[in-house]
Amino acid sequence: MVEYTCPIGISQFSEPSTVVHERLIGMRAQVALDGSATSFAVQYTNQHAFRVHIPIEQMPSIFAEMRYATNTMFTRSRLTLDRGASKLRDIIQAAICPRNAEVLVDPKTNDRLFVFQFMDHSPISLRMTAIEVEYMLGRLSRNAAASYH
């Protein structure tokens, strides 16, 4: 495994703040034909778009860093007075809408596979066991019934 080394000075970035003056308005990946690297086009509200090139051997460390940041954000947001409810509302408001959704059943495991395709986003697939889907549908029914009252 190749370890990713942070460039000198990266630890000198300022702490993130809840006061955000710019927002991410676009991010799109383009993968090399041979799969050896990817580049992300990134666009913020306050600057020109730029590209970030990443070779495949650095992707595991980037995924690990993203998972760490995401888990830490959710953990810390649950510690606030509303126990993360406002952050959950933010996530719901930013939900992406698929243009097509397919549901398949894995014949080996009987898992349900949900494949979502988007106009401006790469596809996402989710795998759930039959029991997890049944539980989720029960929660959906209860939440839908509660929203009608």
Image: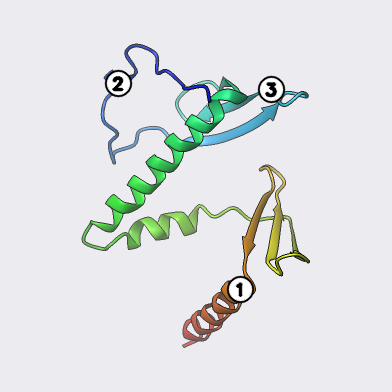
Q: CA distance from mark 1 to mark 2?
A: 43 Å
Q: How dense is the environment of label 2, judged by Cα within 10 Å: few (below 14), some, or many (20 and up)?
A: few
Camera-near label (3 vs 2) is 3
Label for residue 133?
A: 1
Give the residue at x 23% y 56%: 79
Residue underneath mark 2:
11
Q: CA distance from mark 3 to mark 2?
A: 28 Å
Please report whichever mark, 3 or 2, sits nearer to the chain's N-terminal start. Answer: 2
Residue underneath mark 3:
36
- Three-letter amino acid code at the position of disc 2: Ser
Label for residue 2?
A: none
Q: Mark 1 falls on what kind of element?
A: helix
Task: Return the residue nearer the eye: 39 or 131.
Answer: 131
Q: Quadrant of residue 54?
A: top right
The percent coordinates of residue 26 (x first, y second) are: 57, 35
Q: Is residue 113 above or below residue 33?
A: below
Give the residue at x 29% y 58%: 78
The percent coordinates of residue 25 (x first, y second) are: 53, 36
Q: How dense is the environment of label 3, judged by Cα within 10 Å: few (below 14), some, or many (20 and up)?
A: few
Q: Is residue 43 above or below residue 72?
A: above
Marks 3/2 in contact by CB < 8 Å: the verdict is no
- Residue at the farthest top position: 8
Q: Is residue 128 above or below residue 119?
A: below
Please report whichever mark, 1 or 2, sits nearer to the chain's N-terminal start. Answer: 2
Q: Mark 2 falls on what kind of element?
A: helix
Q: Is residue 135 above or below residue 2?
A: below
Q: How dense is the environment of label 1, judged by Cα within 10 Å: few (below 14), some, or many (20 and up)?
A: some
The percent coordinates of residue 146 (x first, y second) are: 47, 84
